Amino acid sequence: MIPVAYDSEIFLLQEYGGVSRYFSSLIEEFLVNPIHGIQPVLSFAKSNNLYLQELKKKSLIDVDSLKFPYMPPTSPWKTLLTWGPIHHGWLALSANAKVKSADAKTLHCTYYRPSYIEQARSEQKVVTVHDFIPERLDWKGVKNPHIGKRRLCRSASLIFCVSQTTAQDLQEFFGISDSRVKVIGHGVSHFGEVHKRSVRSGRAKVLYVGHRGGYKNFKVLSQAAEILDDEGVEIEICTVGPVWTEEESRYFVSRFRNITWKQESNVSDQRLTELYSENDLLCFTSKMEGFGLPILEALAMGTRVLASDIPVFHEVGGEMINYFNPDSRESLSEKIRELLVREPTENEIKLRIEYAREYSWHNVAKKVANAYEEIQ
């Protein structure tokens, strides 16, 4: 068994989210299936991350809760607090004193600022690069929440990119395109069954998963909903993500006559799986992403997907999903109307589930394990 250490940073930064889901799923697969030959070693003992708490309930890991909040780098001054001595002090509070330097020669950095102690324990550093969105948006210095990414990539023995699009960005922004780079995407754990997809009763349901600001482009969905509402189309739109602000609550609850809105936050893996199954369509409106995990999660449950017409979504979803112009509310409203007018066939549902099975966490972990072995 090859021991691989995982640092605490992403599990302190996120209570839930795509990156911490990626690492917790990878760790779970290695723990449940020793056939991969990887022994995960947590360099920390405390975290409020929901996915790790679920692993604790399964008796797979032993992680206590934290009594202090960790400052996420959501603004320049907060980024400063996650950089340097203060940052390392916070990480020390969650450290696992039982983990010795001999436990793992390989450290898989969960974000871009591992502590000095964690780096000193390892001979090889591994990093997963999820996207170059801050660089695309020209966020420089402490405005860039990924500060430290360039330096870490240059010193890493192995770099995982979650998509070919991200690998191309790695070359464009950092000039790195050598043999250290491996393109391995995200995975999915839960798969639906064709016969459990019941015929729709009542109004059609559209699901949105994730944050709603900036490049996530959520506004185009609300604008498309206005068009559909004016046309008398009756649908329900469920958003999964941060709690609505008071302004959002007023806007989405009171303005629409035919369209109803609901919102869920801090959902468990089980609840998210249920939502993918309960809804007729996932709408993914982002103008840029490093991968697009909700696409796979929806396909794994046999659910139709309507996503922005951008290269990375074609890379992830291929011909299994539908596309719209992310700059056009008319394009989105038209596609929603077209897709919801008829029920999907059993064969269509089956093809989506089979497509997603190629991205199972077992398959992903096997590729990651092989890459770990190459640097031993």
Image: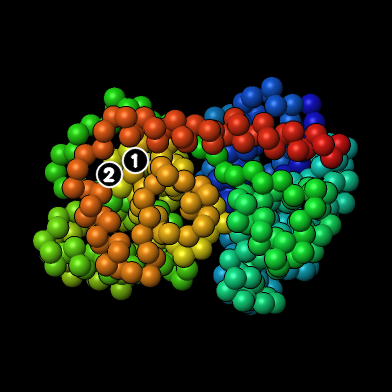
Asked whether 343 or 364 is in front, the reply is 343
Three-letter amino acid code of the residue under disc 2? Asp
Q: Is residue 66 left or right of residue 293?
A: right
Relative placement, left or right, of 62 versus 240 is right
Kindly indicate the quadrant of the structure image that contains residue 258: bottom left
Up the image or down, 92 lies above or below 193; here it is below
Q: Is residue 27 left or right of residue 209?
A: right
The secondary element bearing badge 1 is classed as loop
| Image disc number at residue 280 | 2
Relative to 231, does residue 185 appear above or below in the rendering?
above
Task: Tell me the kind of residue under disc 1.
Answer: Thr
Q: Position of residue 58 (x, y in %)?
A: 54, 29
Crowd band around label 1 with a 10 angstrom C-alpha radius: few (<14), some (14–19), many (20+): many
Cα distance between the residues tagged 2 and 1: 6 Å
**Could you tell me residue 80's position as x and y percent?**
69, 73
Residue 231: image quadrant is bottom left
Mark found first going from the N terminus, 2 or 1? 2
Residue 25 in view, yes or no: yes
Residue 57 visible in the snapshot: no
User: Label 1 near label 2: C-beta < 8 Å?
Assistant: yes
Position above or below: 189 against 221: above
Which one is in front, 9 or 261? Answer: 261
Residue, disc 1: 303
